[in-house]
Image (spheres, helix red, strand yellow):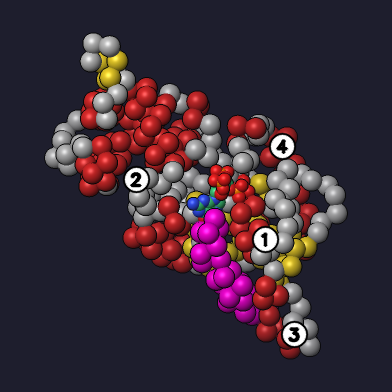
Amino acid sequence: MNDMKDIQWFPGHMAKTGRMIAKSLPLVDAAAELLDARLPLSSRNPELGRLTGKKPRLVILNKADMADPNVTQQWIRYFQKQGLAVMTADSKSGKGVKQFAPALRSLLHEQLAKLEAKGMKGRPIRVMILGIPNVGKSSLINRLAGGKRAKAEDRAGVTRTQQWIKTADGVELLDTPGVLWPKLDDQEVAVRLAMTGAVRDDILDKEALAARLLTMLHKQYPQTLSERYKIAPETEAEGFEYLEMTAKNRGMLLPGGVPNTERAAIMLLDEFRAAKLGRISLERPE
Ligand code: G4P
């Protein structure tokens, strides 16, 4: 697992990644921007538009298996309205991944028609995968490559010669994905990423994080909360009180009957990250 906790995003590092992307872009026909379907905006890099310039872009809502399918549909429309090509994928199981080549062909149909007119039919389409750590870049590359290769190198600014990974349907991938940085200076973004485990959760107090998650679940997924933690949908409480209820209802008590909110928080975050609460989206379009 490539954890953001191992990566210090300081300006020099960002500039290096930016240079690596700038160097690789002229070699590719399109950029594939990998986002987490549960939080597409928070898992998006603010500089990506600037970094990729006019290069055609395909948005891939990955981990779609963990996201609320209704909300994912709304996100698809949201990105389409911005004029972007978009697809969903579950790179862990491989579901949806075979849409990749057709989606690229459709995105690049004009360029491909021009090539064909010049007699260059059958030239491979070359693509670079970009995304923040943990969004699933290596998983997707391995799925597209059909398990023929090891985990992709994930270091920013790698200088060795670029290699191409052949996939089905005449698409080739740059073997080094562009590792982008998230907007961690935005507290809301940091909180959502921490909920999914994409960033270390000690940037925030685990109990505070769990209380925020419970508040969101109560508002958006009351049924889930009631089924799993016996918190009735009509309950009116505040974040930390939900955590106390969860601890009590799960029998997590300290001597004297005090709810063990720390244990409850760890359990809740683990269960959420393991998708035991079902398919949940943390962000929806406005
Ligand atoms: P990265 O290269 O962008 O850093 O991400 P990577 O592929 O390493 O994926 C990070 C984690 O997310 C991995 O889990 C991976 O299995 C999981 N993952 C990637 N894509 C999907 C997806 O579409 N759906 C689901 N459910 N999970 C996905 P891990 O905990 O590091 O390892 P493991 O659980 O696979 O052992």
- Magenta: main secondary structure: helix
Magenta residues (range): 90-111
Task: Decide which of tag 4 and tag 3 comes sooner along the chain.
Answer: 4
Q: Classify mark 1: helix, strand or loop.
A: loop
- Pointer 1 residue: 147
Which tag is nearer the camera, tag 3 or tag 2? Answer: 2
Query: Mark 2, residues whose alpha carbon is within 10 Å: few (<14), some, or many (≥20)?
Result: some
Q: Position of residue 166 (x, y in %)?
A: 74, 67
Query: Mark 1, residues whose alpha carbon is within 10 Å: few (<14), some, or many (≥20)?
Result: few
Relative depth, front residue between 195 and 39: 195
Task: Decide which of tag 2 and tag 1 comes sooner along the chain.
Answer: 1
How far apart in space, not on screen, are marks 1 and 3 (Cα)? 27 Å
Q: Residue at x 26, y 46 (%)?
A: 224
- Pointer 2 residue: 277
Q: Amino acid at mark 3?
A: Lys
Q: Position of residue 69 (x, y in %)?
A: 37, 60
Q: Classify mark 4: helix, strand or loop.
A: helix
Q: Is residue 139 above or below residue 206?
A: below
Which tag is nearer the camera, tag 2 or tag 4? Answer: 2
- Pointer 3 residue: 121
Task: Decide which of tag 1 and tag 4 comes sooner along the chain.
Answer: 4
How far apart in space, not on screen, are marks 1 and 4 (Cα)? 30 Å
Task: Decide which of tag 3 and tag 2 comes sooner along the chain.
Answer: 3
Q: Amino acid at mark 2?
A: Leu
Q: Which mark is residue 13?
A: 4
Q: Classify mark 2: helix, strand or loop.
A: loop
How far apart in space, not on screen, are marks 4 and 3 (Cα)? 39 Å
Q: Which residue is outermost to the top?
A: 256
As for residue 107 lying within the magenta part, the answer is yes
User: Which quadrant holds residue 229?
Assistant: top left
How far apart in space, not on screen, are marks 2 and 1 (Cα)? 30 Å
